[in-house]
Each structure stands twice: as structure tokens, then as C-alpha cells.
Image (cartoon, rainbow, N blue to C red):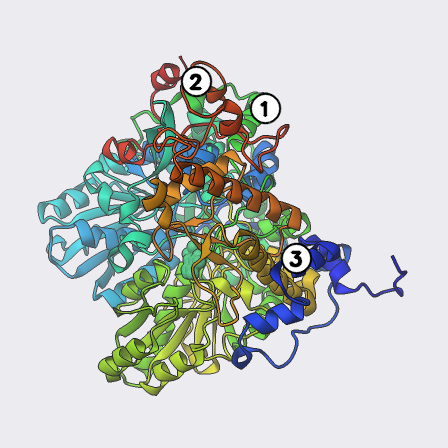
Amino acid sequence: MPFTPTGYLPYDFANRRHIGPSPSEMADMFTAVGVKDLDDLIDQTVPENIRQAEPLDWGRARSEREALHQMRVTAAKNKVLRSLLGQGYHGTVTPPVIQRNILENPAWYTAYTPYQPEISQGRLEALLNFQTMVSDLTGLEIANASLLDEATACAEAMVMGHRVAKSKAKGFFVDENSHPQNIAVMKTRAAPLGIEIIVGDPEADLVPEDVFGAIFQYPGTYGYVRDFTDQIAALHAVKAVGIVSADPLALTVLKEPGAMGADIAVGSTQRFGVPVGMGGPHAAYLATADRHKRAMPGRIVGVSVDARGNKAYRLSLQTREQHIRREKATSNVCTAQALLAVMASFYAVFHGPEGLKAIAQRIHRKTVRMAKGLEAAGFEVTPKHFFDTITVNVGPLQKTVMKSAVEEGINLRPVGDDRIGITLDEATRPGTVESIWRAFGIARKDDDFTPEYRLPDAILRTSDYLTHPVFHMNRAETEMMRYMRRLADRDLALDRAMIPLGSCTMKLNAAAEMMPVSWREFSMIHPMAPADQTEGYTILIEDLKDKLCLITGYDAMSMQPNSGAQGEYAGLLTIAAYHRSRGQERNICLIPISAHGTNPASAHMAGMDVVVVNSAENGDIDVADFRAKAEAAGDKLAACMITYPSTHGVFEETVREVCDITHEFGGQVYIDGANLNAMVGLSKLGEIGGDVSHLNLHKTFAIPHGGGGPGMGPIGVKAHLEPHLPGNGLIGEEGAVSSAPNGSGSILPISWAYVLMMGGAGLTQATRVAILNANYIAARLKGAYEVLFTGHAGRVAHECILDTRPFAESAGITVEDIAKRLMDSGFHAPTMSWPVAGTLMIEPTESETKAELDRFCDAMLSIRAEIRDIEEGRMDAENNPLKNAPHTVEDLVGDWDRPYSREQGCFPAGSFRVDKYWSPVNRVDNVYGDRHLICTCPPLTDYVDTTE
Ligand SMILES: *Cc1c(COP(=O)(O)O)cnc(C)c1O
């Protein structure tokens, strides 16, 4: 290799980390695809009229060490104080066994959403533990497997309440003791739906007849601990619903919402071992009574059986979700907080019910001692009964005390202009209490150990929780570590094989990008910490915004939405606010039939009426139909929502025309940016006609999928929309869409490290190679499978759709059979049945090497040969390797009545002999699971039954 001059690395060397094929592999791929080089391929693929003129450039790409150094320097500008600001964000202690084996373990964080249950049994079990934990703590029968944050969970509960309440009232009552961000996000969500929010004191202001439901905060944001049984009964009397937003740790000592008669409980599981991280990510929960289960938003893990009758987990009730029900779905939630829910569930497994209760009691006793010290010095402390939060009347001394507290290394919360709020947590040390006293001018030792309680006797918890054996396992770390390892081994994540999911861009999540997430300067920052303590975050976020603007051609970015779907919702609200500001009433949103299900679901949430536009024969938007529908909408046209390159995996040449038509009729163009991995450095959304787009940082910008979340869905807008971006509910602005101003702030270092280490040229190269990899797969599978859609030169974009529908007729083989058979070869299936039913959508990304693409193509070709055997009568149509897939170790022993060998069944092309991935269960029965809905851990006797 030629020696390169000092200080300069050619980008194809520097970026070998992210770019799979080596230069020599690429040369072979050009031949297979039939192009001269990458330039030639891109010229054939990306239409001239959308190409950007200037190359993407912000200077030299940083090496790994340089980038990490820059991250360190930036992190050091964040000041880590003990934030006792409460408001739903608490100090917590992440057990190291969880930090190392879950949070920092690619087997967990690189997994995809568990849509293919057979290869997801590990995380499905962990999520079922989460549901069981939530269900037990709240005293409600059924819980989902996480929502995005507490405030959006409150909004989801409100809308769910609206769906299930028989009361026809328009109002919704919100406890004035709710966390401010919860109130802000519920207001945002209520407005487009015509729901009237009434904020007030539950004991004085609630008029049940005026509302379809009410939400109460428990304990309240200022510490009040109240029993809402009477309010909920009064609501039920007029057929309205009662919702409680509860701190799950408090529920270990306090009467549970279920016992108050609540219909729904929501809250955040952040303090179950998940660092505050500038506001996220952490998992919110939603639990409900059995009677409302079908109206529940989000994913629910359930128990079913596999083809051998063994217990197997799967996602249940999926027909309620946006990908099926579109604008009639229960919500738009897609990516949620799976990894964080897994962490919280392991925190409960780690501590067990006694451990959790001990933590809660310790926090409470510390709070009592702190309060006694303040009272002894003459301060007035409110409320009389509390769990972990009090407010102190300091009269004119508010600023002085807060400043002294900061000098002691502590952030306290200003309440009004004469009170100070203090919330203690698991990480509070006796020294912390003494520091608080000193801030109030009290010199005192924390030596009062009288175990006094200030919880009201009437609402102490009396029922059991976490009785399932999983919460009582031997807690030796050996056992914990092995349980985590066992579950991880059941799953197929990116650390083992390509996950070629169309539209979901499962690319490398490089170790260097992940490391800063665990640094305390990023993970221990409260989202409401004063700005002078978060300078590092500000630098990071502003620079990332600038680069994302350069990449997309937009003028401004909001980092608030914490998923792609939340970005869609925020973007459409921005459009709606813009029209309103110009005195226009526009509510029609044109959406192509091929759109992702979250698009219509989000449009509905933003109060828009969806008009569906047809696709032409070649998969493109039918421009004539688009024009006709835009014309028909006329001055009611609010927006169109298109995806570019299209969900069919081609760069449509007519995109500018579609944008022009929308603008001609006064509408705004929303371009779904989930496919941005095909565009970075080649074309800009803001230049081809987009007014607003969301970017999925957990797709294009290297944030891992976490088995179904976290994600980040920031939106970019053109300048005219900037004044209408979502406000920041925390500081009293209207229009917040998430709990925290910058969404899940603590995962932004991942995307920042990614763009720093890639540089403009590296990112552009990634795009080009992503397109090469997809075209290589299309070329290798040509003749065996038909590629459904291509551009004019016969090329696909960064993904391709294979038509597997003909095999239903010719061999009785469905797309599902193919997906399951791929598991035997050690692959996660591509996206199934979207955007066209009965097809497979494959997106390899730039990260995969030619060798891995070949392994995948070999597997696909061998599947095709097996189908041909059925077509031509050499293999039975029912009893064959496809229908029986996936094969498990159980298939290696015992009777074998199949017309093919165990060898063929278990070791098809592409599978490894030594490192063979074994699906832990045979094919999972979906129908059975929905018919016998079980969404909490089954009793241990069931486990015994199935292993016999
Ligand atoms: C992934 C995706 C979304 C939704 O993003 P989430 O982060 O899962 O909410 C929207 N549109 C398209 C085309 C997608 O692929």
C-alpha cells in the first residue's frame, strides 16, 4: 500500500469502518451489476434533475481517536450536578451488570423490532417481564411494551380514553399537579382533535359531567400524594374514564391505580436504572383494565405456541396498529423504547419486589429527614404527606438559596417565585441532604435515623406485586449475567448477521459512536438543568443541526420528536400552524397508497383528513390522479406526504412535479425522510421541493434500533416554517410534542460521532455504496426472483422489492414461508408485505461486505431451488423445508417423517456449520396467540409443562 502523506487519510481508507465492500470486492460487484464504476451506477440511478450541485463538505473526516477526543472535550463542557429537580426525571443507579450486559451489549442494542417472533424470543421475554412488572405495580391487567416518554403516554391515554369512554362530553380534566411537560403535550395533542383541556384541582374543580375523562398525577409534581378513588368513581358514574399518571417506584409503597378503580395508568420507568440523559431515552408505560385492551396503543407482547406446541412469545393484537389500520389505528407509535424497557425490566428482576420497596422506603426516609431538618430551622414545608418530593417556602430568598445549592453541587427547582421544590432519589447520599441544608443556611448532620413515615396510612399499598418467579430468581451476579446472555443468544441481531430490512436501514452502530452514551457528562444531565450546565450538549446539538441542514437543504431543525412517527406528527402540526397564521383553513392531506402506515396515522392525529393517491403501474405516484385530487381539494389542501426515494425503492423522476402541484394549490410538502440513506450527499430534500421532513437518526445516522427503540425523528423545515416549529413546553411555550426539549438527547452523540467520523465525502460514499449493495443483490437474484420496480435504466435505489407472489400459485409458498426459511440460514427476514402485499423488501445498507451479501444471495437462491422442487413435483407441497421452517435443535433428534434430510432442513445454504444460529422455537402460531391473549408472564407451571 502506498505511503500516504502525514495528516491525510483518503476517505475510502478512513471510512472502512462503515463501508462494507473492500475496493477489490467493489470491483467484482461493478462487473456483476454491469457498470463501470460507482459514478456510472449513480448516474444511471439518481435522476439528473434532483442531484445536488455541490459536494457535501465540512472539512476533513475525523479519525476515531480524533472524534472521541472531540466528544470528550465537548462532554467536559457539561457540568454534572446532582439534579433534584424531579418533574418525572430522577437520579438512579444503573446496576453495572445491566449497563455492561444490556445497554453496552450489541446483542441487545443492535436488534430489530421483534416482528419475526422466532428469532426474537429473548427480547420478547424481557419485554413480557416489563409488561408483567408494569401490570403488577399499577394493579391493572394489561400493559404494553413501552411508549416514548411520560408526556406522550399521557396524551395517548387521553386519546385512548376518548375512544373508550361512553360519555360524549368534549372536555378532558387535567390535574394541575401534573408535570408541566405532561400538560403541554396533552394540550398539543388535544387541540386538533377538538378536545377541550380543563386544568384544575381534582378536589375542587373536577365536574365529571363536563368531561369524558380525567388524568391525575400520583404523586403530584409538587409532592402531593392523594387517593383518587372518589374522583374516579364519580367519573365512572357519568361513564367517563379515570387515568392516573404514576411513578412506578412510589407504587411499591402506595396504593396502586388499579385499586383506585383507574381505567388506565401511565408513567415513566426511567428511575428503574435508566439514566436521565438530558431527557431520554427511557421507556414510558401504559397499562389498562382488561375491558379496554383492544383500544390500547403501542406494541403488546403476548404468549402463544409454536408448531410443536411449545410456549413461544410474539407481538399480539397487531391488527390495531398503524401499519394495518392506518388513519384508524389506535396511535401512530412505531419505534418506541424497547431497549430501555428491557433495562427497566432487568432492574426489577435484579432488585425484586423487596429490593424495589427498600429503595422506595430509603428515598422516603431521606426525604422525611430532609424535611425535618428544614422544619426545625423554621421553614414551612408542603405537603404534609409526601413520597419523595416537597416544596419549601423561602419567601424572597429563592434565588439566593438556589445559588447556594448550585455552589453545593445541587440543582433545586424554582416553584412560583417564593418556593423551592426538592425531589430525592436512589442516588441521594446522606451528604446530599447535608448539602441541601447548607444551601438553606442550616448547619446540621444527617444523623436522625428515627424511621418516621409521612405517607398517609389510608393509601399505603396492601397488595402483592412482582410475585412471578422471574422476579425472585437467585440474584447472584453469575445468575443475572447468564440470564441476560441466555436471552440475548436466542435473538438474531446485527452482531451476528445482516438484517436486510427495507426502509429500516439496519446499518453499523460503531463502537466508538456508542461509547459516549455511557459517559456521565452526557447520561447524568437533567433535561431542566440550567443552560450554563449544558454547554456541551448545546455545542453538540447545534453542530449536528447545522450538518443535518447542510445534508437536507433545510434551514432549521427541531430535535424534539423522539421517533420518526413523532417527527411526522410534529411536521404536520408545523404545517397546520403555518396555514393558520396566514388565516387559512386547510385540512386535506394527500398521501400515496404506498405510504408507511405512520403517515396517515400521524395526519389523522394532526387533525387532517387523508385523501389517498393511487400508484401507477410502475410503482410511482400516479401524477394525473395526484393532480386531480389536489385540484379537488383546492383551497382545503393542507399538505401532501410523500416518501423519497419512494417506498418502492426507486428515485421517481416526477417528484418535482408532485411538489409543484402541491404548492400550486397552496399546500405544503412533507417528505418522509426515512429513506435518506439513499440521498445523503447526492440530493437534498429541501431542494427537490420539500417544506418539511423528518429524519430517522436510528436509520440513516447510526443510532441502533435497540430491538424496537430508542429512536430520534428530528424535523427539518424551510425558513418560512421555522417560527411554527414545536415549542418547548417546559418553559411555557405552546406546542410541545415530547417530554423533553431535545427529545432523547443522550443518543444524539451517536449521530454526531457518525457524521464527524464520516465527513461529507464519507457520507456520500456510504450512500453510493448502499445503492451499489442493493443493485448487487438485485443483479445476483435476477432470473430467480423478479425485482418489482426499477428506474428507467433498470436500477433500484438503496433497496429492492422481490416479487414472491407467483409462488403462492405455483408452489403454495408464501412470503412468510420464505422469511422463516431464511432463519435456517441465519438471516433476519427482509421487510415482509410492505409496501406491496406478498413481497419482500431488501435493504442491505453500505455496512455489509460482499461476502455477507453473497451469503444472503446464496440462501435466497437455494430457497428458490427448493420452491422449484415443489413446483416440479420433486418435493411435497405441504411437508417441505419451507413450510417446516424454521428448524430447531428439536428437529435433530427423535422421529423424522420428512421427505428431505435433517441436513437439508437444518443446514441450508448460507448457514454456518460451527456458528450455526438456531431459532429457539419452531414456527409461532399467530392466530392462537390472539385468540388466547396472555400478556403477562405465564405461571411457572407452564414452563415446566413445555420442557417435559
Ligand atoms: C421507519 C419509518 C417511519 C416511522 O419511523 P419510526 O421511527 O419507527 O416512528 C416512517 N416512514 C417510513 C418510510 C419508515 O421507514
Which numbered mark, 3 or 1, is in the foreground of this view? 3
Q: Secondary structure at mark 2?
A: loop
Q: Is residue 699 above or below residue 914?
A: below
Work out whether residue 659 or residue 390 is closer to the camera in this orientation and state it. 659
In the image, residue 902 above or below residue 178: above
- Local crowd at mark 1 within 10 Å, few (<14), some, or many (≥20)? few
- Mark 2–mark 3 Cα distance, whole angstroms, equals 41 Å
Quarter of the rendered structure image containing ligand 1: bottom left
- Circles 2 and 3, Cβ within 8 Å, touching? The answer is no
Location of residue 496 by image quarter: top right
Q: Quadrant of residue 594?
A: bottom left
| Position in image of residue 346 (x %, y %) | 49, 32
What type is the residue that disc 2 sits on? Answer: Trp
**Residue type at mark 3?**
Met
Task: Evaluate whether residue 532 shows in this view.
Answer: no
Q: Earlier in the sequence, mark 2 or mark 1?
A: 1
Q: Which residue is mark 2?
A: 896
Identify the secondary structure beneath mark 1: helix
Identify residue type, mark 1: Glu
Label 2: few (<14), some (14–19) or many (≥20) C-alpha neighbours in 10 Å? few
Q: Write down the residue under mark 1.
A: 477
Q: Distance from label 2 to label 1 (Cα)?
A: 41 Å
Task: Tell me, yes or no, whether the two marked residues, 2 and 1, touch with CB atoms within 8 Å.
Answer: no
Task: Locate the N terminus by quadrant.
Answer: bottom right
Name which residue lies at 27% across and 47% down.
319
| Distance between mark 3 and mark 1 Cα atoms | 48 Å
- Say whether marks 3 and 1 touch (CB < 8 Å): no
Counting labels gives 3
Quickly name the residue at label 3: 29
